[in-house]
Image: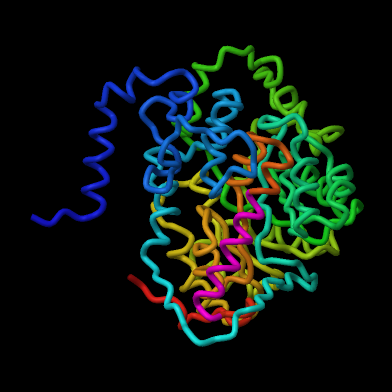
Amino acid sequence: MLVDRATSRRRFLQFLAGSPFLAGNLPARAEAPAAGVRLPDPIMWAPLKMENLIKSPKEAINVFDFEPVCRVNVPPAHFGYMASGIDDEVTLRANREGFAKFQLRPRRLVDVSKVDMSTEILGVKYDSPIIIAPVGGQQSFHQDGEVAVAKAARAGNHLQILSTATNTGVEEVTAARGAPLWYQLYATNKWEVAKAMVARAEKSGCLAVAVTIDRSGGRNQETLFRLVPTDSRDCNACHERGSLATNLKRRAMYQGLDISGLSHTQSSNMTWDFLKRLRDTTKMKIVLKGVLAHEDAVLAADAGMDAIIVSNHGGRSEDSGRSTIDALPEIVEAVRGRMPILIDSGFRRGTDIVKALALGANAVCIGRPYIWGLGAFGQPGVERVLELLRVELFAAMQQVGAPTVKHLVPAMVRRA
């Protein structure tokens, strides 16, 4: 009897869930990465032996080697914040499983002795199309936080997008990067807050503001909520729940702002009118982060947006079950070259990146993997994660016969 992949995987996970070996017989350091019976990002891509953790970034064979080390080093609540999807985490899994739906078509007898991975994004040339996605509160994973990531980005000449929820101010991160950043905006429902943040980012030299448009409501982050009670620290020391102002006291970009009247940082009232108002306020490029439907991509192009990021927030904002790599082809077709298309969510391999670029994306944003590296080893960990992705991307481009990024075309990919 034939059993499809999803059924086989489900049965295997059921077996693991009932296994006394995983339930309680692992030593402390080996048990920690598993976080109970939940295995890392999903099991088919996880390190094969989690008890054999790498001791230095140089030992890493792929980016997944950093995740269990991060799990050991980082407090449970902080790890849960990073690792969590929402609800059944269908979208979180779909982001990885979606890549298996696309096959690369290797081409031979092409001179790929030299591969140029450089790419231009909104008029600026970078050494590779690998972008550092915004992730909030990076000091939750390592004391050097966003500064360590900026220095790693500088070493590999990667574009870095800084989160609104950064622990460190945009000025200091820009100085550490040594080049202009992009600033990711959680606009909230108060125009004055968004305006002040955008003005500060522009003053610091940011080239673009990436407006997140998918955080319009609440979310049930089950993995986070299950790990929080296992954290023995007094979380109120950093996260006071008495008010939004006290809860955001370690978020640098909110300091000095009047957030009275706000109970959260979501943008539930955002419409296209907000973007018109933003266009009149800043000279920075405006990028929309969170586009998943071709209709919205067309509206963005019609409205004169400078770029979009095809994103489901890494499975952290909604649980539609739709991966970004699945959404990409229809969006590329709808946009018809009128603006650059970036993409994030679930990218872990050089082959993942090649598939997206061949399907029409101009660049790919990486999130959780560099946080694994940060939590595991600080700046050297981030540098190694980015290096591994560049090495894999280089090799994947050689295999499909693409000596430059511009040579990656849709014909190099087919649906499985």
Identify the residue at the far bottom of this view.
Answer: 109
Residue 282 locus on image (x, y percent): 84, 60
At a point 56% along the width and 71% down the height, the residue shown is 357
Apparent side of residue 223 relative to residue 285 in the rendered image (left or right):
left
Residue bounds of the magenta highlight: 385-401
At x 56% / y 51%, what residue is drawn? 214
Left or right of 301 on screen, residue 152: right
Residue nearest the observer in this picture, 184 or 213: 184
Q: In terms of image quadrants, where is residue 376?
A: top right
Image location of residue 341, percent across then percent down: 61, 69
Nearest the eye: 210 or 271: 210
Name the residue at the left extreme.
1
Residue 3 position in % (x across, y down): 16, 53
> In this rendering, is residue 179 above or below 78?
below
From the top left corner, tell me how far across and down residue 298 is, in percent. 57, 73
Q: Is residue 399 magenta?
A: yes
For this rendering, which residue is in front, 415 or 208? 415
Residue at horizontal 61 percent and vertical 27 percent from the top: 74
Residue 56 forms part of the magenta stretch? no
Is residue 256 rendered to the left or right of residue 28?
Answer: right
Picture layout, residue 382 above or below residue 110 = above
The secondary structure making up most of the magenta span is: helix
Q: What residue do we see at 36% from left, 73% from top?
A: 415
Q: Nearer the viewer, residue 316 or 187?
A: 316
